[in-house]
Amino acid sequence: MVRVYLTESDHGLKPLLKCLHDELGVLGATVTRGVAGFGASGVVHSAGLVDLSTDLPLVLEFFDRPDRARIAIERIKDFVDPGHLVSWSVRVEGDERASASPG
């Protein structure tokens, strides 16, 4: 499982998704828009009821077999700021394409 932390003002989301989908063909990806968050700068970004457009946090998650996830991480790490990409091992249930022995 790989998680990438972005903000709405980052212009790398579309190229990142295009790379993951078209070039790398990862098994699945989801982008979630956060209602609040902060990073190393300490600046809190949040949405109120009246806010229509703000610089809210985005989280892109994707998964694949460990070998393919590692290739994807190496390919996309130039799309994101250092420290904004994390990964961990997961077990995918019921999908032979994602099966790998635990490691």
Image (cartoon, rainbow, N blue to C red):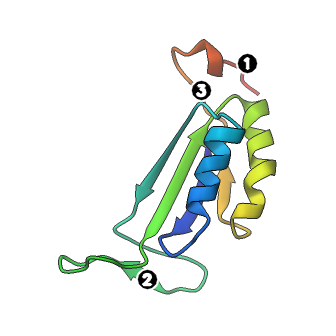
Q: Residues within 10 Å of mark 3 (few under 14, many from 20)?
A: few
Q: Give the residue displayed 75% in from the left and 48% down from the top.
A: 73
Of the two numbered discs 2 and 3 on the same chain, state the one appearing first in sequence: 2
C-alpha span from label 1 to label 3: 9 Å
Q: Residue 7: x, y in percent?
A: 51, 71
Whether residue 2 is situated above or below residue 44 in the rendered picture = above
* Figure check: 9 above or below 59: below
In this rendering, position of residue 95 left or right of residue 35: right
Q: Nearer the viewer, residue 13 or 99?
A: 13
Amino acid found under the numbered disc labelled 1: Ser
Residue that label 3 marks: 91
Q: Which residue is mark 2?
A: 44
Q: Secondary structure at mark 3?
A: loop
Q: Is residue 93 left or right of residue 80?
A: left
Indicate the position of residue 5 as horizontal and vertical percent values.
57, 63
Q: Residue at x 51, y 14 (%)?
A: 94
Q: Quadrant of residue 55?
A: bottom left
The residue where tag 1 is placed is: 101
Label 2 to label 3: alpha-carbon separation: 33 Å
Direction from residue 96 to residue 51 in the image, left or right: left
* Residue 89 image offset from top left, x and y in percent: 67, 36
Q: Amino acid at mark 3?
A: Arg
Q: Quadrant of the N terminus?
A: top right
Residue 7: which numbered mark, if any?
none
Residue count near mark 2 (Cα–Cα under 10 Å), binned few <14, some 14–19, many ≥20: few
Question: x, y (%) of residue 63?
Answer: 61, 36
Which residue lies at the image location 42% right of the left edge and 54% below the top edge?
32
- Label 1, secondary structure: give it: loop
| Residue 7 to residue 23: above or below | below
Q: Residues within 10 Å of mark 1 (few under 14, many from 20)?
A: few
Q: What amino acid type should be assigned to the residue bearing mark 2?
A: Val
